[in-house]
Image (cartoon, rainbow, N blue to C red):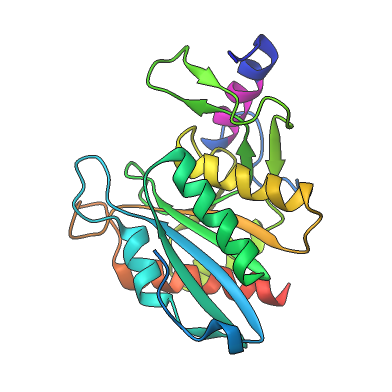
């Protein structure tokens, strides 16, 4: 279903907000085999496989390095998602059903970014290649969902650690946004006591002069998890 004018206006507002025009961003609005069955609490973390012209996706490296770690008593369970709308969403939802996590932290690459972006809004829209090809992910569900992540607190703690970061209101209209929206929607529909959110990371410093070191990305993800577990 093609979007209506109201939805176009909402998108424009969100885009302007995300780049700092007009609104404040401070609004309140493949599984690694680990012994998760004996863990008291599970934090599900997701990343994506390489796509486009990139041989490496930093979000995949984050998952490979953090999966099986324990943070504040919670065991991290990592899955690598395919760059495919249907399959990626199905895998995350199935993992939620199978492992009953207390937290879902999804990560993805924003190649044009120079810092960590903590996303606040998942939009019920997807982009299929042309500016007018915008469709609902689910025509029967709300236009957007807000992540319950304490984004301002996460960003503040990342900056204290020397990691460039900011809150973002616009996760794009591709698969990263689809995963964010779909997980939030699934949680709402099923009345689950799970908090979920999305972290966009830039390219690695080895991939681009304005990129970021993997260690900083790992630290940033760890900080986000710690803040969510303790707030």
- Of helix, strand and loop, which mostly describes the magenta segment? helix
- At x 64% / y 17%, what residue is drawn? 9
Q: Residue 133's spot in the image, x, y percent?
A: 47, 15
197 vs 200, left or right, is right
Q: Quadrant of the C terminus?
A: bottom right
- At x 64% / y 30%, what residue is drawn? 138
Q: Residue 120's spot in the image, x, y percent?
A: 63, 47
Q: How many marks?
A: 0
Residue 135 is covered by the magenta coloring: no
- Please state which of residues 21 and 220 is positioned toward the viewer in this rendering: 220
Question: In this picture, is 174 found above or below 212?
Answer: above
Q: Quadrant of the N terminus?
A: top right
Specify the segment rendered in magenta.
10-17
Question: In this picture, is 114 found above or below 231?
Answer: above
- Please state which of residues 159 and 54 is positioned toward the viewer in this rendering: 54
Question: In this picture, is 132 found above or below 96?
Answer: above
- Please state which of residues 19 and 207 is positioned toward the viewer in this rendering: 207
- At x 20% / y 51%, what residue is drawn? 208
60 vs 200, left or right, is left
194 vs 125, left or right, is right
Residue 16 is covered by the magenta coloring: yes
Q: Residue 188's spot in the image, x, y percent?
A: 77, 49
- At x 29% / y 55%, what residue is drawn? 57
Q: Residue 142's spot in the image, x, y percent?
A: 74, 32
Residue at the far right: name it.
191
């Amino acid at each position: 279903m093609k979007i209506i004018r109201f939805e176009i206006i909402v998108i424009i507002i969100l885009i302007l907000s995300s780049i700092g025009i007009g609104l404040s961003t401070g609004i309140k609005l493949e599984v690694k085999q680990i012994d998760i069955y004996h863990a008291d609490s599970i934090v599900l973390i997701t990343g994506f496989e390489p796509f486009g012209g990139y041989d490496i996706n930093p979000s995949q490296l984050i998952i490979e390095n953090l999966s099986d770690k324990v943070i504040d008593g919670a065991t991290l369970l990592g899955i690598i998602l395919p760059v495919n709308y249907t399959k990626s969403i199905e895998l995350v939802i199935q993992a939620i059903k199978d492992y009953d996590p207390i937290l879902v932290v999804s990560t993805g690459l924003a190649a044009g970014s120079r810092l960590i972006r903590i996303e606040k809004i998942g939009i019920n829209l997807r982009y299929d290649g042309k500016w007018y090809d915008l469709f609902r992910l689910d025509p029967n569900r709300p236009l957007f969902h807000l992540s319950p992540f304490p984004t301002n607190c996460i960003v503040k703690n990342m900056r204290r650690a020397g990691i460039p970061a900011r809150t973002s209101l616009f996760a794009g209209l591709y698969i990263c946004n689809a995963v964010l929206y779909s997980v939030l929607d699934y949680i709402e529909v099923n009345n689950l006591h799970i908090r979920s959110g999305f972290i966009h990371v830039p390219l690695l410093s080895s991939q681009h002069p304005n990129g970021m070191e993997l260690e900083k990305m790992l630290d940033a993800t760890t900080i986000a998890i710690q803040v969510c577990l303790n707030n």
